[in-house]
Image (cartoon, coloured by chain):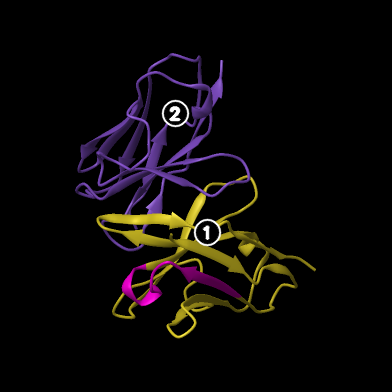
Chain colours: A yellow, B purple
Amino acid sequence: DVQLVESGGGLIQPGGSLRLSCVASGFSVSDYYMSWVRQAPGKGLEWVSTLDRAGTTFYADSVRGRFSISRDNSHNTLYLQMNNLRAEDTAVYYCARDGSQRSFQYWGQGTVVTVSS
Amino acid sequence: DVQMTQSPSTLSASVGDRVTITCRASQSVNSWLAWFQQKPGRAPKPLIYKASNLESGVPSRFSGSGSGTEFTLTISSLQPDDFATYYCQQYNTFSWTFGQGTKVEIK
């Protein structure tokens, strides 16, 4: 079975850095488009970043230059390195995997990031 | 970026009602449009992919249609489990974008 488990969230001060992890099981992260999607408190869903099978990265304008998506094939894990965090980055961050003709077929349970002094 | 606009933002309906949610794109996304259902505190659940294809395990009362810039999600007979927030999402071009959501409430 496909499973995605995020971790690494927490309370961080503005300007700080945090790395989120998404451990995958039941498939290889290198074989799929892997993404991060976030949801600020009481708000809608926002696509953050995608890493495709070839290793090409895509970012939302709101995080480009501050966030970096990567994967470790040996640990079958997706990462999101978040630098220079702002209050508006406060959200639940979800890891998601694509499927045939789909963008987000499988989702993790999410990890909470709170940026506050 | 492609802007996705859903209407209505909130919908009040009764069990058994037929419900339709509209999603409009600021430019053509062909058929690369998905629909998700989300309940409070839960991850989104995929319902429809490529505009009109039902995800495995999703009840047949859900259906999607449209192409280009206008899409609809229809629930043929609303059930108690369907009260939730629904999002459309385009994946024709990066940046992928979501609609703002439609909350389906109990009337």
Could you say where residue A3 lies in the image, as x and y percent from the top left?
A: 49, 62
Residue under label 2, please give it: B8
- Label 2: state its secondary structure: loop
| In the image, residue B8 above or below residue B15 | below
- Give the residue at x 26% y 56%: B92
Tell me which amino acid carries mark 1. Answer: Gly
Query: Residue shown at 37%/31% (left/top)?
Result: B59
Callout 2: 10 Å neighbours few (<14), some, many (20+)?
some
Q: Residues within 10 Å of mark 1 (few under 14, many from 20)?
A: many
| Parent chain of label 2 | B
Which residue is the site of mark 1?
A: A108
User: Do circles 2 and 1 both sit on a common chain?
Assistant: no
Q: At which x and y percent is residue B8?
A: 44, 28
> Quick one: quadrant of the C terminus of chain B?
top right
The residue lying at 59 percent from left, 59 percent from top is A110
Looking at the image, residue A99 lies above or below residue A25: above
Res B24 quadrant in image: top left
Q: Does A66 appear above or below B76?
A: below
Gap between marks 2 and 1 measured at Cα: 28 Å
Magenta span of residues:
A20-33
Q: Nearer the viewer, mark 2 or mark 1?
A: 1
Q: Are marks 2 and 1 in contact (CB under 8 Å)?
A: no
Residue A39 visible to an observer of this rendering: yes
Q: Quadrant of residue B71?
A: top left
> Is A50 a magenta residue?
no
| The residue positioned farthest toward the right in the image shown | A117
* Left or right: where B61 falls relative to A77: left
> Residue B11: x, y in percent?
49, 24
